[in-house]
Image (spheres, rainbow, N blue to C red):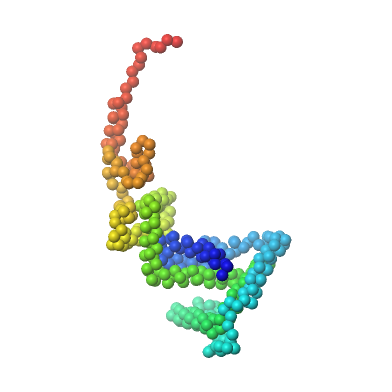
Amino acid sequence: GRTWSLWLASFSFLASPFWFNPLTFDWRTVVSDYGTWLRWICGTTGGAQKSWSMWWNEENAFYKDMPILSKAFYCIKVALLVLIGEGVRRSDLFKSDTSLSKPTISVGYVLAFLLGLIVCNQLFTATEHSMPYPVRRTVGILLSVGISIAVVTVFVEDTNFIRYSLAAYYIIGAINFVGLLAGVKAVKPFFMIHDLVCGHMMFIPLFLLSILQLPGYYQMWVLYSNALSSDVVVSDILRYARRSQESGDGDKDEDLVEQVTELRKIVQKQEQMLAEAGFGQRMQSPAASSVSRPAAVSQSVAGPKTELKPNRALSMSGIDVWGEMALGEVPQSQIPQESILSANTSTNDAFTFTQPDTMPPR
C-alpha cells in the first residue's frame, strides 16, 4: 500500500505516449504496428532497426570488454533481484490453503499437460516450414490456445502459483543477468521471451480499446478540445507536416504520408462530431480549413489587403507574420508579376536624385 505512488508514476510514463498519440486507438494503425513489431521481434538481419536480435547484440556488446571489477559492481543488481524474488515467495501475496479448498483439477496434471504442449510447440516450430499452410495455421492456433488455457487453469486452481511465478521472474532474471555478464549466449532466448511477453501486455489492451472505438473518440475529443482552447491551431500542424514532406530530397517518407492522411481523416470526422454536439464554429474553423484547403494556395494572398486571423500577433510594422506568404506557403510562381512590377514602378517614381550646384566649403 505504500508504493502506490511509484506504481502510478510508472503507469503514467508507460501510458502517456499512447494517450497523446491521436492514432493510438485506430484499429488499422494498431494492426499495422503489431505486424511491424512482430517482424522486428522475429527478424534476424537488417540491423537494429529491423531485428530484435541485432538490436540486442548491439545493446549488450559493451559487457564483453567490461573489466572484472565493473562486472562485480553489477552483481549488486543480481543480489537485489534475488532478494526481491525471495521476498515475494515468502509473502502472503495470493496465498491460499489448498488443504481447505482442493483444486477441481490436479495442478500436477495441468503442469504435465502444459509441459507436453511446450515440447510439441518446439517440435512444431522446427518443422513448420515443411507443412502446408492450412495445417501449419491450424496446428499453431491449437497449440497457442492449449498453452493459454493450461496457464490460466494453473493460476485459477491454485493462486499460489501467481506468487511463485512472480518470484521465479526475479530469480530467473538474476540468473540470466549473471550469464550475460559471463558472455553466455544461451540467455538470449530468455530475454527475447521477456520482451515478447511485455510487448503483448501492451498490445492486448490496445487491441481491446480499438475494438470498442469509444475510447478513441473520447481521446480525440479531449485532445482536440484542449488543443483548440489553448490556441493551438490544427491547420498549422498539418501545414508544417506538409511542408516537411515537400521539402525532402526526393525520398518519400511513406510513414509520414500515411500519418498525415490518417490525421486529416480523423480531423474531418472529429469536426463533424463536434459540430453535431453543438460546440460551435470556434473549434470547427481552424481544422476544417486545413483539411478542405487544397495544396495550391489561393491567389488572394497577393492582393492589396491581407485578411488577418484572430488572436494572431502582428509585427511592429503591421505585417501579418502568420500569413501564408510569411510562412513560405506560396511559391514564387504563384505571385502575380503585375504586383511586383507596380511596386518597383511606384518606388522609382517616388525617388529622385539631384546634384548640388556648388560644393560645400572645406
Q: Which residue is nearer to you in this view: 105 or 137?
A: 105
Res. 244 in view: yes
Query: Quarter holding the C terminus?
Result: top left
Measured as percent of width and height from the top left, residue 261 is found at 36, 59
In the drawing, does residue 59 fall left or right of residue 225? Answer: right
Q: In this picture, is 10 found above or below 352? A: below
Left or right of residue 127, residue 219 in this image = left
Residue 177 position, x and y percent, is: 64, 68
Q: How many marks?
A: 0
Q: Residue at (31%, 29%) from the top-left corner?
A: 347
Q: Residue at x 53, y 63 (%)?
A: 9
Among all residues in the image, which is located at the extreme right? 69
**Image x and y of residue 119, in percent:** 57, 82
Task: Reply above or below: 255 against 297.
Answer: below
- Can you tell which quarter of the image residue 319 is in? top left
Please state the horizontal and vertical placement of residue 301, each as a whole percent of the image: 29, 43
Residue 270 vs residue 298, the one in the foreground: 270
Q: Which residue lies at the image location 69% right of the left edge and 66% below the top edge?
A: 75
Residue furthest front in the image: 2
Q: Is residue 246 visible?
A: no
Q: Is residue 165 above or below residue 62?
A: below
The N terminus lies in which quarter of the figure?
bottom right
Picture quadrant of residue 29: bottom left
Left or right of 345 on screen, residue 201: right
Of 156 and 179, the residue lying toward us? 156
Q: Residue at x 50, y 80 (%)?
A: 148
